[in-house]
């Protein structure tokens, strides 16, 4: 089971379903204390048990489930998320400690009498963190807490949008694409433990990657950056960023989620591709973790100066110390910037909770 945030659209529809249900079933419209509202909803549950099967009353069962879940949210410590095995939309309430109640599954089991618990007993057990055995009551593997994951997801998506719009700050279209792919990867691994870079790459390929063209222009640029000394260039990048990473003052939430992938790249730098792509990816990911971005840039400049004799010279340049034409790939005549930007936009749109809102998976 994995949890992901519900879209604004789904949250709005969920709130409307709860309001309709409470207005229909409760004379006071659900304004009382949460446990008193649940006590009133218990009478609705008894009525549904006595009047037909759960499938014939699917809308009423769902509405009752959402109304019950909202009382846990009102009590505090619980929030609405989508919880499912396959990423489909399944509104559920999730506690900050990782406990979850898939409310539609649980209420359905009560209506079909496969669960002996009542709503009040379930509410009190969930509110008091009691050990409950009931269909739909599960514990998620959530580290760090869900609010941290939500914040991290929003920040990564914002950075992805920024990356695709600030095209020319990257040395080449391939570097731009590599940075976006690696940000996508850390987002997906935060959601799904065990997710692999091969799976991330397959997602990109599904949407048309590689988006960058200009193969001859990229090759010409690289022939000036390190000529035949590709491994020297890769080593300079790896050692330079390892030094910066070791001394970095880090944002603790981002550090927890990005460290495994950053350190894997430092241990196996060929995962990022050519030295220029490795340089761009490490620059972006480590900068994202930095608590003080300006201090990070200053330290990186000193490291570049130590390696190549000039604070603005990329670490992958192999040649005489100091500034050189080889350090200025921005003068190359690349033509596929927009193709990469548009490709990144397609991948972002395909990510769950990133803006795509399926029309056929809405709360009842």
Image: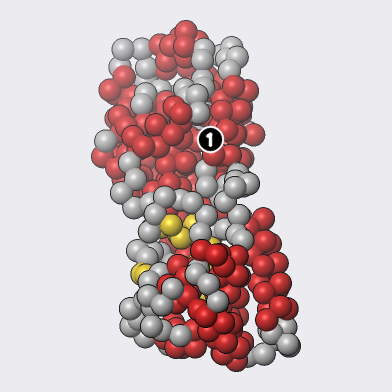
The percent position of residue 247, horizontal first and vertical second, equals 37, 52
* Residue in the image at 49% along x and 84% along y: 119
- In the image shown, does 280 or 98 lie closer to the viewer? 98
The percent position of residue 286, horizontal first and vertical second, equals 44, 45
- In the image shown, does 47 or 360 lie closer to the viewer? 47
- In the image shown, does 191 or 112 lie closer to the viewer? 112
Q: Is residue 346 left or right of residue 274?
A: right
- In the image shown, does 191 or 331 lie closer to the viewer? 191
Split into 4 quadrants, where in the image is the C terminus? bottom right
* Residue in the image at 37% along x and 23% along y: 274
Q: Quadrant of residue 145?
A: bottom left
Q: Quadrant of residue 40?
A: bottom right
Split into 4 quadrants, where in the image is the N terminus? bottom left
From the image, tell me which residue sits under label 1. 347
Q: Secondary structure at mark 1?
A: helix
Categorize mark 1 by other alpha carbons within 10 Å: few (<14), some (14-19), many (20+): many
Res. 172 visible in picture: no
The percent position of residue 152, horizontal first and vertical second, equals 51, 56
The percent position of residue 182, horizontal first and vertical second, equals 43, 38
Res. 356 visible in picture: yes
* Residue in the image at 40% along x and 37% along y: 200
* Residue in the image at 56% along x and 25% along y: 340
């Amino acid at each position: 089971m994995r949890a992901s945030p519900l879209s604004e659209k789904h949250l709005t529809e969920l709130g409307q379903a709860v309001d309709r249900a409470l207005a229909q079933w409760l004379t006071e419209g659900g304004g009382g204390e949460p446990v008193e509202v649940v006590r009133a909803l218990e009478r609705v549950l008894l009525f549904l048990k006595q009047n037909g099967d759960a499938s014939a009353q699917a809308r009423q069962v769902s509405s009752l489930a959402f109304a019950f879940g909202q009382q846990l949210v009102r009590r505090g410590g619980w929030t609405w998320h989508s919880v499912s095995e396959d990423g489909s939309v399944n509104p559920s309430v999730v506690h900050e400690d990782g406990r979850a109640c898939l409310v539609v599954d649980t209420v359905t089991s009560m209506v079909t009498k496969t669960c002996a618990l009542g709503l009040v007993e379930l509410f009190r057990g969930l509110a008091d963190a009691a050990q409950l055995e009931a269909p739909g009551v599960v514990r998620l593997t959530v580290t760090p807490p869900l609010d941290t994951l939500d914040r991290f997801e929003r920040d990564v998506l914002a950075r992805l949008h920024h990356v695709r719009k600030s095209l020319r700050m990257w040395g080449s279209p391939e570097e731009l694409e590599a940075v976006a792919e690696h940000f996508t990867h850390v987002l997906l691994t935060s959601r799904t433990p065990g997710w692999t870079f091969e799976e991330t790459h397959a997602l990109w390929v599904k949407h048309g990657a590689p988006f960058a063209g200009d193969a001859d222009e990229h090759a010409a640029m690289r022939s000036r950056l390190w000529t035949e000394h590709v491994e020297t260039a890769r080593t300079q990048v790896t050692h330079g960023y390892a030094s910066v990473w070791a001394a970095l003052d880090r944002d603790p939430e981002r550090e927890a989620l990005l460290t495994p992938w950053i350190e894997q790249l430092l241990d196996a730098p060929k995962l990022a591709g050519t030295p220029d792509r490795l340089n761009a990816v490490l620059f972006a990911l480590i900068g994202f973790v930095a608590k003080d971005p300006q201090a990070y840039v200053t330290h990186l400049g000193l490291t570049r100066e130590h390696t190549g004799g000039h604070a603005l010279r990329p670490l992958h340049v192999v040649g005489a110390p100091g500034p050189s034409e080889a350090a200025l790939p921005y003068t190359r005549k690349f033509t596929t910037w927009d193709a990469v930007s548009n490709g990144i936009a397609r991948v972002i749109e395909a990510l769950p909770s990133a803006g795509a809102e399926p029309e056929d998976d809405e709360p009842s």
